[in-house]
Amino acid sequence: RFPESQTGHDCRVLKPQISDEFDYEGELAVIIGKTGKNIKREEALQYVAGYSCYMDGSVRDWQHSWFTAGKNWQETGAFGPWMVTADQIAPGQVMTLTTRLNGQVMQQATTDLMIHSIPRQIAYISSFIPLKPGDVIVTGTPGGVGNKRNPPVFMAPGDVVEVEVDAVGVLRNTIADD
């Protein structure tokens, strides 16, 4: 994501006026704490500074033609409310991620069900680009996103979206028109 596409906790998230398919994706964010390249899986967690919550707002009707366009509208992704340092979360600790839209649970899963583990993601990404302090890996979303529901559920101005990671906290944002 480009920096302008992100916002913080309790800040507005902007629904592009041109979109009818603004979707939520609750995710765990991994913040890198030291530089590394070609990091081995078994050493990967040594490079983690901490963890946070991420709401990866996706403009689905633009994502179909070009993935980057669906993820980089101004203030469509939210990050926070803070970073919990790696020493406060045991290696391999199972965390529960829950996404709520207007108080209704839309997504819920545990980190042990991730398709790609955090160490695997760090090892893979560092194989083609060095990771640096402050880099953020957004680790993927569980099932339940709006465009996969029948009928589809998309975010609209006035909606409140919350991403909770039980070991981290709750990221809360209100959707507003761009």
Image: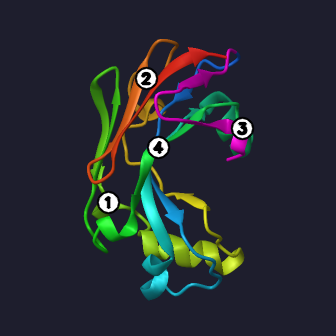
4 or 1: tag closer to the N-terminus: 4
Q: Residue at x 30, y 66 (%)?
A: 89
Q: Earlier in the sequence, mark 1 or mark 3?
A: 3
Kindly state the secondary structure of the residue where label 4 is placed. Answer: strand
- Corner quadrant of residue 128: bottom right
Q: Position of residue 78 (x, y in %)?
A: 53, 37
Q: Is residue 90 left or right of residue 156?
A: left
The residue that disc 3 covers is 4
Q: Nearer the viewer, mark 1 or mark 2?
A: 1
Magenta segment includes 9? yes
Pointers 1 and 2 in contact (CB under 8 A)? Answer: no
Mark 2 vs mark 3: in front? 3
Q: Earlier in the sequence, mark 3 or mark 4?
A: 3
Chain-order first, disc 2 or disc 4: 4
Residue at the location (28% across, 25% down)? 104
**Mark 2 → mark 4, Cα distance in angstroms:** 24 Å
Q: Which residue is mark 2?
A: 153
Q: Magenta span covers which residues? A: 1-17
Image quadrant where residue 177 sits: top right
* Point 61% across, 72% down: residue: 125
Which of label 4 and label 1 is nearer to you?
4
Element carrying mark 1: helix
Amino acid type indicated by mark 1: Thr
Camera sees residue 64: no
